[in-house]
Image (spheres, helix red, strand yellow):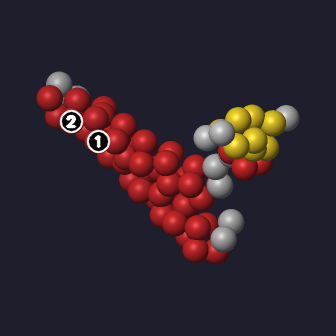
């Protein structure tokens, strides 16, 4: 299947993100989501929500680092 992108015909393979880029983007998303949960947990005095936010933020950092490693290795 072909698409037009910036007045150029491209294939699906040319449009899809690399695995490393997906990991970095998803990692950043989870870091932000975790930070929001942490703040919400602090404001609502909810230690479980705060802990879930911390865990999600750390998981996001790990996923982002995995993306960086994949980028260096060319995957």
Q: How many numbered markers are drawn?
A: 2
Whether residue 51 can be seen here: no
Left or right: 67 with respect to 38? right
Residue 61 lies in quadrant = bottom left
- Quadrant occupied by the C terminus: bottom right
- Quadrant occupied by the N terminus: top right
**What number is the disc on residue 35?**
1
Q: Nearer the viewer, residue 74 or 11?
A: 11
User: 37 above or below 70?
Assistant: above
Left or right: 34 with respect to 9? left
Kindly report the distance in space between the C-alpha atoms of the residues bearing marks 1 and 2. Answer: 6 Å
Outermost residue on the right side: it is 1
Left or right: 68 with respect to 50? right
Identify which residue is drawn at 61% across, 41% down: 6
Percent from the top left, x then y, of residue 5? 65, 39
Q: Which secondary structure, mark 2?
A: helix
- Label 1 Cα crowd, 10 Å radius (few <14 / some 14-19 / many 20+): many
Left or right: 34 with respect to 6? left
Identify which residue is drawn at 72% across, 49% down: 14
Location of mark 2 (residue): 39
Q: Which secondary structure, mark 1?
A: helix
Q: Nearer the viewer, residue 34 or 64?
A: 64
Identify which residue is drawn at 64% across, 74% down: 73
Residue contact at pointers 1 and 2, CB within 8 angstroms: yes
Percent from the top left, x then y, of residue 36? 28, 35
Outermost residue on the top side: it is 44
Whether residue 36 can be seen here: yes
Outermost residue on the front side: it is 7
**What number is the disc on residue 50?**
none
Outermost residue on the bottom side: it is 73
User: 64 above or below 32?
Assistant: below
- Label 2 Cα crowd, 10 Å radius (few <14 / some 14-19 / many 20+): some
């Amino acid at each position: 299947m072909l698409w037009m992108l910036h007045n150029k015909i491209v294939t699906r393979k040319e449009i899809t993100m690399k695995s490393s880029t997906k990991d970095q983007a998803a990692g950043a998303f989870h870091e932000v989501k975790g930070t929001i949960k942490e703040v919400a947990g602090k404001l609502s005095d909810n230690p479980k929500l705060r802990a879930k936010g911390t865990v999600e933020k750390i998981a996001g950092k790990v996923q982002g680092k995995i993306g960086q490693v994949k980028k260096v290795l060319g995957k």
